[in-house]
Image (tube, rainbow, N blue to C red):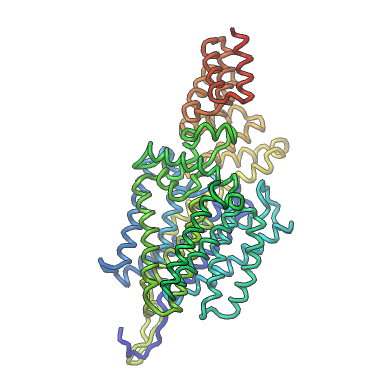
Amino acid sequence: MNKKSSFKLKNQNSNSVWFLILGVASTTLFLKTDFYDPFNTAKLILLLVVSGWIFGHLLYSYKAEPITLKSKQFITLIIVISFILFLAISTAFSDVLVVSLIGDTQRRNGFLCYLALSVIFLYASKSINKFNVLRVYKVGILTGFIVSFYGLMQLNGKDFIAWNNPYNAMISTLGNPNFASAILATLFSLAFFGLLQNNLNLVFKLISLIFILIALVAIIGSDSRQGLLAIFFSLIFYFSVYVYLRNKTNGIFLILFSGIISILAMLGMLQKGPLTSILYKDSVSVRGYYWRAGIEMFKEFPFTGVGVDRYGAYFKEFREAGYALRYGYDITSSNAHNTFIHFFATSGVFVGIAYLSLVFFVFITGINSLKRGDLEDKKVLLGLLSAWIGFQSQSLISIDNIGISVWGWLLSGAILGLCNNNEVVVEKSLNVQTASGRSVVQINVFQPLVSSVILLPIVIGSTYLYRAETNLNYLKNYSTALATQNRPILFERSNQILGSRFIDPYYKFRTALLLLDTGEANKAYEVIKELHSFDKKNSDYMRSLAYLEGMRNNSAAAISIRKELSKTDPWNADNYFQLMLLYKNSSDIDNTNSIGRQIISIAPESDYAKKAKEILSLNE
């Protein structure tokens, strides 16, 4: 570009960058109260729409500015393509394709979610530079202010939505205190480091101060320590590196000290060391069971994993006996509570390595770029990198929730963009004036055309998700009244759910249970039987089907299903006891005694063991 040209320069894709960042913020804030899952499915739908439109901008950016083979952008693209390709292969090998596509119930971390996050990441890495990066700070600060203010309202009993909430009141727009605490920690870091930027105007600094105070109250009120720990790791990283940039000797000393404190903090979370009494919570200890189960899944299925977001279907098969005894036979988990382990467990070694490579590449690129530029530019980059560190620290002990992870992927892309995109280029879609003074109209039809084509299947698929959510929520709230007043509506809504293909299978199961409650036992039986044939690993389907077979006096079928369940849920004393009763009622003394001894062996102190001993004593 000729620097002597007289036409006005403008940052490339200015409007699309605003759309990108505001789309990320909207995903965190968006919820639908008329959905069965008002948080996760709602956020997935919006995420898909945002990324679908951004995809056109992404392709146009590659078309307008082709990347070179030796550039960091090329390395970034190769890593992301590898991640998506291997994730697609794992999805294709999944035993339940629709779950791996849209994600498990109340998680929605399926292939489509990560495809959308990858688009956001890539476009951020292409479009964000030092001339527009403060938009990330500004939108992050405003988003955090809204999330924290709503959380503060909930803590004070002023919530304008009557949630059916079994957790702490502070769930904000995330649906869970841990998630709300984690997103506030990430955005708190952006606000805190934004205060240190000279280029951030006074208004946003005042908003940042207010948000920081409210966020601390909300995080503490949530009784979730992962938010405080994320803030701790973010702050300690920032100041250690900042001091190092100013004075290497002092910096090295502070980094070593910070490393020791960080190790002690992590040990304290694991109930070891002097900080145990401050940092340890039983909810952290239980994560050890989730991590070890995930590691066992990976060992059993090293190449494809158990299936994208299929952790919950396999957890009971791979959990330890101690978990069932301590927390209950029917208590389960649908996530490894560690993003890295979860990828390896559900998607295999290639996806796990690709994701690790992406995280490592972002970190190394960010650190290396801190060696260049003036101090103000370094502070902007260091703030993003430190907030990103806070996000990664919470991902070691938490679920990859869409409302949080969308910021993690945006920050990752912004860090790479800030490291790579240091020049302002011409806004190609605007009317520009050439050096000779002539006005040239350049109309970009490529982007809206591509975006529209991508959005079409997204809108169709989202319509299925929308209908399933609203129908099931309607049935859940009004099924009892409908059963006595207007049964046609009950059948109409339930048939819409049962007849849909692109739907979470668990929603069909919940519909079947509602039909059972309203006296439609035969219909419920047929639905659950079909679901069981569709998903052989789901213990909810097996338990319900065994129960219904028993109601139909089909003991042989009930026994067969419970024996099948014992393979996928080998530490469930309740299932073994029900199987024992079935054998007893069938006058099969040998198997009755065999199952009874098994119950006593795996759960010797349980009520089931006491009952089994009574039955065994009668048989002797």
In the rendered view, would you say 161 is above or below 133? above
Q: Quadrant of the N terminus?
A: bottom left
Left or right of 595 in this view: 449: left
Q: Residue furthest top?
A: 620
Estimate the x, y position of residue 296 in percent, counting from the top left: 42, 38
> Residue lying farthest left?
69
| x and y percentages locating residue 16 in the rendered image | 45, 71
Examine the rendered structure and indicate whether residue 260 appears above or below residue 371: above
- Whether residue 17 appears in this view of the structure is yes
Q: Which residue does the image show at 52% across and 67% down from the upper left?
A: 22
Query: Where is 144 relative to 313, above or below?
Result: below
Can you say which quadrant of the picture contains the C terminus?
A: top right
The answer to whether residue 359 is left or right of residue 75 is right
Q: Measured from the top left, where is residue 321 in percent x and y?
A: 52, 31
The residue at the far right in this view is 157
Q: Nearer the viewer, residue 135 or 379?
A: 379
Q: In which quadrant of the rendered view does residue 228 lie?
A: bottom right
Query: What x and y, as percent, mark residue 262?
Result: 50, 57
Residue 448 at least partly seen: no
The residue shown at (54%, 25%) is: 602
State the image quarter where residue 251 is shown: bottom left
Q: Nearer the viewer, residue 122 or 154?
A: 154
Q: So how many labels did they put on this image? A: 0
From the viewer's side, name the closer residue of 288 and 526.
288
